[in-house]
Image (tube, rainbow, N blue to C red):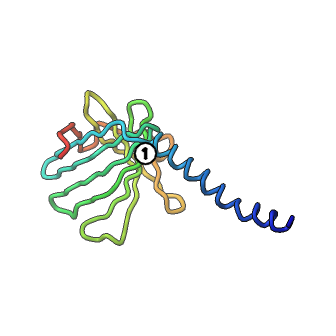
Amino acid sequence: MKRNLLYLAFASIPFVFACNQSEKKAETAKKDSLINQTCYAAFFEKDSAAMIVKTMASGKVTGSLLVKYADKPQNNGKIDGKFSGDTLYVDYRFNTGKDTTTAFTNPLAFLKKDGKMIMGVAQIETTLGRSYFVKGKPINYTAGKFIFAAVNCK
């Protein structure tokens, strides 16, 4: 009888763990609810870009970025990051052109100023297959070609 109770106790552990995990997931989902979504558009010469920025209750930022070049294939992908003061730092995971099998990831920075998002330009280094902004090198927000203005989301 004691063995049966012992087996029953051990067999119930995964169920208790699973119940706790689903409660944590529900709590995280509630904490990470969408609090704001803003759509942006930018134009530079013959190039254009569209970005959707979704700010979550946890402070995380997600969304999408599409860059259409006049003379090159377009870049289309997702952004994930967070604000640090008035600067949005994201990882941009994108595909180029019709190639959906190869994904690239680059860091991007946007300065939020006067309701616009100014894309910065900085030196990037890659370590162990991951790209980062070079530490100690400033991000230049005047040399960037895209200044995103808020537009109505469609």
Q: Is residue 3 above or below residue 144?
A: below
Q: Is residue 60 above or below residue 107?
A: above
Q: Position of residue 139 (x, y in %)?
A: 39, 40
Determine the image quadrant of residue 114.
top left
Left or right: where 145 falls relative to 24? left
**Other residues around mark 1 within 10 Å, as few (<14) / some (14–19) / many (≥20):** some
Residue occupying image coordinates x 18% and y 50%: 48
Residue at the spot of label 1: 81
Q: Quadrant of residue 152?
A: top left
Depth check: give the residue in front, 45 or 90. Answer: 90
Q: x%, y% of residue 119? A: 30, 42
Q: How many marks?
A: 1
In terms of depth relative to the viewer, which is nearer, 54 or 3?
A: 3
For this view, does 151 lie left or right of residue 12? Answer: left
Amino acid at pointer 1: Gly
Residue nearest the viewer, comparing 94 with 73: 94
**Which residue is at a point 30% across and 51% down the rendered structure image?**
64
Residue at point 43% right, 45% down? 81
Closer to the camera, 117 or 81?
81
Percent position of residue 35, x then y = 36, 36
Q: For the point 22% across and 64% down, which residue is it?
A: 73
Q: Secondary structure at mark 1?
A: strand
Q: Position of residue 72 (x, y in %)?
A: 20, 63
